[in-house]
Every structure is written in structure tokens, then in C-alpha cells.
Amino acid sequence: MLKSTHKSVSGPQQGNLPAGWTEHKAPTGHTYYYNAETKQSTYTRPVTFTPPVAQAPIVHPSYPTDRQSQFASTPASTNFARPAFEKRVPRRDHGANDRPKTKHAIPGCLPWLLVKTKLGRRFVHNPETGESLWKIPEDVMKWVLEYDIQSQRRKHGQPEKTETEHSTRIEPHQDERVEETNEHESTTVEAAKVEAEPELASDEEYEEVEVTDDEDAEGPSKRQKLSPAADEPDQAAELGEDDMAYQLAEMEALEADFDDDNAMNDAEDSGWTDADAIASFHSLLDDHAIDPFTTWASVLDAGHILDNARYTHLPTTRARRDAFATWSTAHIARARAAKHAHAKQDPRIPFLALLHAHASPKLFWPEFRRKHKRAPALRDPALPDRDRERLYREHAARLAKTPPAALVADLHALLRSVPPGEEWNAASSVHGALPAALQSDVRWISLPAARRDALVQEFIATQLPAPADAAAGGERVAAEARQKDQERREEALRGRREVVEEARRRQERDVRVERARMAEGEEERRRALAVGKGGLVASVAMGREEEQGEE
Amino acid sequence: MPKVKTNRIKYPDGWELIEPTLCELDAKMREAESDPNDGKRKCEAFWPIFKIAHQKSRYIFDLYYKRNEISKELYEFCLEQGYADRNLIAKWKKSGYESLCCLRCIQPRDHNFGTTCVCRVPEHLREEKAVECVHCGCGGCASGD
Ligand SMILES: [Zn+2]
Ligand SMILES: [Zn+2]
């Protein structure tokens, strides 16, 4: 009975429009009205004596522009100006007129959420078990009632919304608003057509209440007073599991939308700063092991980071590109510093490592060289071929002739020959970075790797003075600082989420109020006033008479 | 017989870091070149090629002038090897041409009335806000935009 039908509401009413209003045909075939002065558009035919209600300014969404290099992200070819009416056409998706509006945690029985749909129906949802029930179970119902009472009390304590807040409405809601108007209108018309049965009347009243309601606490309670809760079960029959799943999905989509829209709008006071947003974006780049030398365009093309929530912490593409630039610069600087440290590496070290792995006394030098001519250690121009040959011969001779005990003694002599200091400290904190003086000596590679490493570990443990731990300590401090920073950021993020959530709720409320204003014409307002005196049925009847009178 | 070294390019330091990106752009360029251009307007056929050429030059330009991440040697090497357009980069260094899309767009003899391309007009002076220039598909490359 609440199905919205776009019947020719305005068909018979071919009277004059108020000044400034013009009549148009939407591509969907519906007639709508546009006021060029106030930039208002509506499906409801404006009435002559009605002053335009709530002329909220249309805020154009700002598009992130990416200008410095016009090719940087996406080709500009999609920038066709869209005809203005496209936004005004109501969405008709899923065939369902209802959609979820609010979701509240029910205090007292926590996993359960109370979901309210646009038409004011309520169901409970348990995100942990995935259950959704139109018929609220008894134990949950108890808490829902409690919650209703509380929220009602809260509402009465709160002052009404002020006018200025309404102007924070954003454009994308316009279509929803129009749709709301539309639906409202059609229900009104239907109510006028059908004889006002008590049940329908209560429903109509209910719709009324839902639309004008602000904190949506009054709806259910009033409703229970008016109708003997008889329509609850048949609605449950009318809407199946699919419907409920759809409501939940819509709910989530709605929330996602808001996250996008609101992100960073008023998050300053939560402790979440721009620097944090940039840092979290950087950590995203780190996690995805993005090549710092790549271009921003190819990062976007690859698209790995686009799905991540951290990607949206920065509001615009330009900010993201700048963050990427700073990140890559820092990364490259770090890589360069590391490379500088590495650059002094003795060319003998990789060569000796190669010998250690592959050389054998059975092989002569030319054979060895031919066999491994592709190895980079043999192509490094920094080490002359002559030296390579000499090292090879020496190594082969040691392997063939020196007894193992002598080799061990040699290794010990070598270890002792390196003075304790910086390099050893580095060795004990970072694995494998042993002093270069060790690794560039031919004695270093005489023993099998496992045996040699055991000996070296033993030597470090027993013979070396305890490392001053300067380097390791520094590392640990840095790591701790990073950790702390991360925690702080998470904290701030949580704060920001709350703020965004709060903003979202506020905005939702504003939108609702705004919708109510749109939907409520002067007529409806009068009827609403009449409810107090003549009762509901009388008010509906009166509204019908007036409409007929106009025709 | 003496060993003759032929075709040996000596890659400067840091080449291995920028090589993947340049190779990727090269691959894109090959793809664009072999693209059949079905259903496109005649002038649109070359847009992807201009776009990728712009990206490559911009990449080298940014690395050397903006981010200071490659050595002069490597920068010169890239120019010599044709990874970037020296003339386009020369324009970018001049004020007013910081984000020029391509050289044809500022070539008066390629235009009616001896002027430059529509994409060179700052956005606030243009009548139509969304443009695509006929040469390279540029949507606006005036410095102030
Ligand atoms: Zn241009
Ligand atoms: Zn151009």
C-alpha cells in the first residue's frame, strides 16, 4: 500500500504556476517543476500561495583536480559536462521503496543493532551471527524499549536544530530528497483516493510522523499508541530475508558514502592531523613495496593501493601525489645512503665468496674462469684479472696442502688481527655484516661455511669485549619510536573515526530535517495542526477535501 | 685476433633504479603504437603516443630537476638514448611553459591565425571548460591551471 506510483498527479491541475516556476518533462516521463530563481526543483506542483520552503544553497561537490601534469592520472576525455537534470532523476533501484536509514547499537544487548528503514520500519540485526529479524525477539525487545525511552528522553532534553545547520546539506542527497517528496506525494494521493480505513490512516499518520521526525524516537512510541501494533506482522510477511539483506547492504553503502564525503572535513579536533594522514599514506606505500622510482601514474594504473582504506585518508588526488613524491624522495635518499655505505665494499669480497662456493683444488684457474665467466664477481672491473688469478691459486693451494688444524689456527689469527671496534659492533647487532677486513682475506674462505661461522660466533661470544650496544641501542630506539608513532596514529585514527561518525550522524539528521521540510507543504502543515483538534481520521479527510477543492 | 667490443653501452650509476619504469613506459609506447585505433577519430590516433612520450620526458625531467634523484650523467644518458625529449624539457624550464603538453601545441604555423593551441589558454579565460586539443588530446596545460 505504500508503493510509490507516479500517476498523473499534476495532470488535471493545469492552472497557473507561481511566479518563477516552470514546468518540465524529465527523461523518465515525469513532470517536474523548476524555479530558476531559487534553483529549486521538485516533483510536487508548487502551489501559488506557498512560499518556497527551505532554500538550501546547492553546494557543488568539489572535484579533485590534478593539474600540474594534465596527463598525470586519468585522461581528461571523460570530462563531459553533465546535463543538470541527470541529478534530479530519482533512483529506482531494487524495486524496493524502502531503504535503511539509521543503525543504532542497542545498549544492554550489544551485538544487536536496531536498524531503521526510511519508511520507519525497524528490524534488529546481529552482525556477529549475521541474523536479521523483522520480529524482534523478546529478550532484545526489552532493551529496544529501554533504548526508545532513553532516546526520547534525550531528545526532549535537546534543543531544536537551528536554521543555519541545514545549509550544510550536500548535493548528492538532492535526488533522495526529491524521491522522498515524490513518495510522500503519491502516498498522500492514495490516501485521498481510498476511503480512510483506520489502518491506512494510522499508516498515513505514521508516514507523516516518520517524515517530520527528527531523532526518530517518537515514531515508534506514537505508533504504538495509535495502532494496536497490528501491522507489524504483515509487514514482516511482506518483506523477506532478501529484503533485509538488501537493507543491510544499503546501510553499509550509505556509510561508505559518508566516509568518502566526510573524510577529513572536520577531523582536526580529534588529534588526527594532516601529517598523520600523510604518514598513514606513506605506510601504505611501504606495505605495498612500491618502487620509489616509479611514477605516480603507474602507481595509479597498477591500482593495488586504491582499495585500501588508508588511500582515502588523504582527501584529494593531488595531496596523494604530493605525498607520494615526498615518500619516494625520502626512500631514494635512504637507499642512496645505504648504497654509499656499500660502495666502499672491497671488490675481493664477492670474488672470494664465489671461490668459497665453487673453487676446488682440482680446477685450474682458466677452467674456473671459463666455467663461471657469467658470474658478476668475475666481471667486476674494479678487481684486475691478475689479482683474481693470484687469489685463486693461493686459495686452491691452501685447500690442497694445508692441514685443517692449521686452517683453524689461521682463521683465529685473522679474527684476532681485526681490532675490536665499530665494525664488530655492527656485526653483533646486524647479522652477516662482519668486518670487511675479514671477508677480504683469503684465510676467511678456507674452512667450510658452517664450521667457520660456528668458530666466528664462538670468537665473538668469548673473545670480544661486550659490545657497547650503541648501534643496536640506536636501532631499538628508532624501532620503538616508530612503534609509538604507529600507536599514536591509530589512536588518532580512532578519534577521527568518531568525529567522522559524529559528523555523519549530524548530517544524516540534517538531511532528514531537510527532507521533512521539503515534503511538508503548507497543506500538510495545516493538516498536522488539525490533528491535535479533530483527530487523525478527520485530518486526513480534511486534506482530501482541500485537494478536491483545488481541482 | 684482437677483441673488438661492439654495441657496448655503458650504463651510468643508478640506471638500474629507473630502468623498470622506463621499460614499462616503453612497453606502453609499443602497445600504443601497435594499437589499431578502431573507431577513433583521425586526430585521436596519436594521442596515446603523445601522452606516453610526455610521461617519459616528464619522468626524466622530474627525477633530475624536481626530485634531484639522478645524476647529471644519467640524465644526459637518458636524453641521448631517447628516453626523453630534450626540446620539450627545454620548454618546461621556461616560465609559462612549465606543464606544456607537446611542442606542436605552441607551434604557430600549425594553427589558424598563427596562434597556439586552445589547451594553452588558461582555464578561466576559456569559454568551454572541458577541452581536448586536436594535437595531443591535452585538456589544458597553461601554467596557472
Ligand atoms: Zn596542451
Ligand atoms: Zn599538445
Image (cartoon, rainbow, N blue to C red):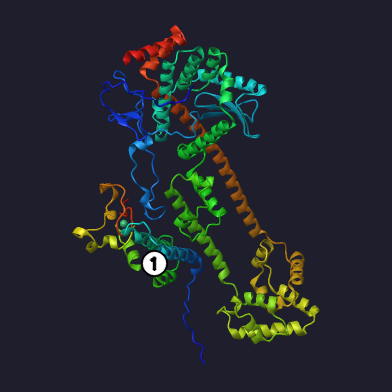
- Residue A134's quadrant in the figure? top right
Residue A77: x and y in percent read: 36, 51
Neighbour class for label 1 at 10 Å: few (<14), some, many (≥20)?
Answer: many
Q: Does residue A485 appear left or right of residue A30 in this picture? A: right
Q: Residue furthest bottom?
A: B1
B103 versus A412 height, above or below: above
B50 versus A279 height, above or below: below
- For label 1, being within 8 Å of ligand 2 is answered no
B96 versus A121 height, above or below: below
Q: Residue furthest top?
A: A533
How many numbered marks, from 0 up?
Answer: 1
Q: Does residue A510 appear left or right of residue B130 in this picture? A: right
What is the three-letter code of the residue carrying label 1? Ala
Ligand 1 resides in the quarter of the picture at: bottom left
Residue A177: x and y in percent read: 41, 29
Would residue A60 be seen by someone viewing this image from the given angle?
A: yes
Residue position marked by numbered label 1 in the rendering? B84
Query: The residue tagged with tag 1: helix, strand or loop?
Result: loop
Q: Chain of mark 1?
A: B
Which one is nearer the viewer's eye here, A320 or A512?
Answer: A512
Residue A419: x and y in percent read: 68, 71
Residue A58: x and y in percent read: 35, 33
Q: Which residue is drawn at the image coordinates 45% and 13% (left, top)? A: A195
A136 versus A459 height, above or below: above
Q: Residue furthest left?
A: B113
Would residue A498 be seen by someone viewing this image from the given angle?
A: no
